[in-house]
Amino acid sequence: MILITRPREKAKQLAAQLKKKNINSRTDSLISFYLKNIKINFEPYSDCLIASVQAVNAIKQKHRKEIKHLKKCNHYVIGDEAAKALRALRITKIKKVFHNSDELLNYLSTSSHRIKKLCYLSSNVNNTKLLKKLDTLRINYKREIIYSVQPKAKLTLKTVNDLRAERIHVVTLFSLYTAQTYINSVHLANLSKSAKKLAYICLSDDIATFMKRKGYKKAIASKSPLEYSLIQSVAEFMAKR
């Protein structure tokens, strides 16, 4: 069985995709998102960095009056889903879409486009690598925290029982924050030792490397940072069992 740790709606979608491949799963969403009620003046910004679909949801629900200003900005977007959601708001000045922050940073390091002032629409979780690189490149930016990521207090009793009974063989991890939350949760449930025997299919090399450093040696990165690639990695792993 696969344990899916994504937020609720995304977890349901992934479970449905795995079911099509005859792979059983259960969901235990370890994080949730909350939009913040803050006022932002987007008028001074020439460019905007949007790193998640949650940031676009925050624009849609909390900052509709500011969309007219955002339409004038050049947008750097991480993820096809975020780009699609942005276009649905008729914000179409998308400079480029990236698979992950590493691709974005490589582009910014070599791009000749001059950024006057960048608005980075972010969650409360620090992307330390991204922030350090923006500073190194001397990009004039301001981070605007428009939604928060909240960790779940503990695993559900069903998940704990499944882990103890060794019914779960693979755990999917989509972010470093979720990976750390998962480690905290299994520690709280006194399951760290048995959890280190499981396989972890991770969306990126960074997540897999993090898990290995924490003692979870069976951490595997999907070939690309896309959901379909992670699903393929899960299918390949399960076929070998």
Image (cartoon, rainbow, N blue to C red):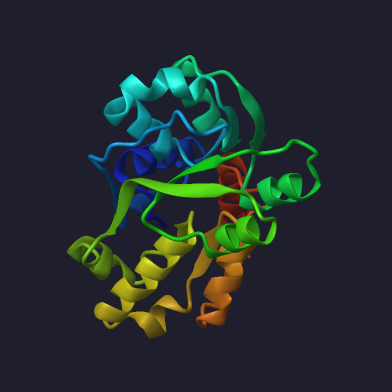
Number of marks in the image?
0
Single out the residue that lies furthest toward the top: 90
Above or below — where is 72 with respect to 176? above
Q: Going 45% across and 49% down the picture, which residue do you hit?
A: 143
Q: Quadrant of residue 187?
A: bottom left
The quarter of the image holding the C terminus is bottom right
The residue sitting at 40% across, 85% down in the picture is 193
Vertical arrangement, residue 170 with respect to residue 90, above or below: below
Q: Looking at the image, which is closer to me, 51 or 73? A: 73
The answer, for residue 16, to whether it is visible in the render is no
Residue 173 position within the rendered picture, expressed as x and y whole percent measured from the top left: 47, 58
Q: In the rendered image of this protein, does residue 9 appear above or below residue 30?
A: above
5 on left or right of 34: right
Classify residue 240 as left or right of residue 153.
Answer: right
Quadrant of the frame with the N terminus: bottom left
Coordinates of residue 118 in the picture (x, y in percent): 56, 41
Judge by depth and name the residue closer to the eye, 20 or 87. 87
- Where residue 140 appears, as percent x and y from the top left, is 59, 48
Q: Is residue 160 left or right of residue 69?
A: left
Inspect this view and state whether residue 10 appears: yes
Residue at 58% across / 67% down in the picture? 208
Is 82 drawn above or below residue 34 in the view shown? above
Q: Name which quarter of the figure residue 192 lies in.
A: bottom left
Percent from the top left, x then y, of residue 198? 48, 72
Q: Nearer the viewer, residue 52 or 159?
A: 52
Residue located 37% across and 55% down the image: 5
Name the quadrant containing residue 13: top left
Q: Name the outermost residue toward the left.
A: 157
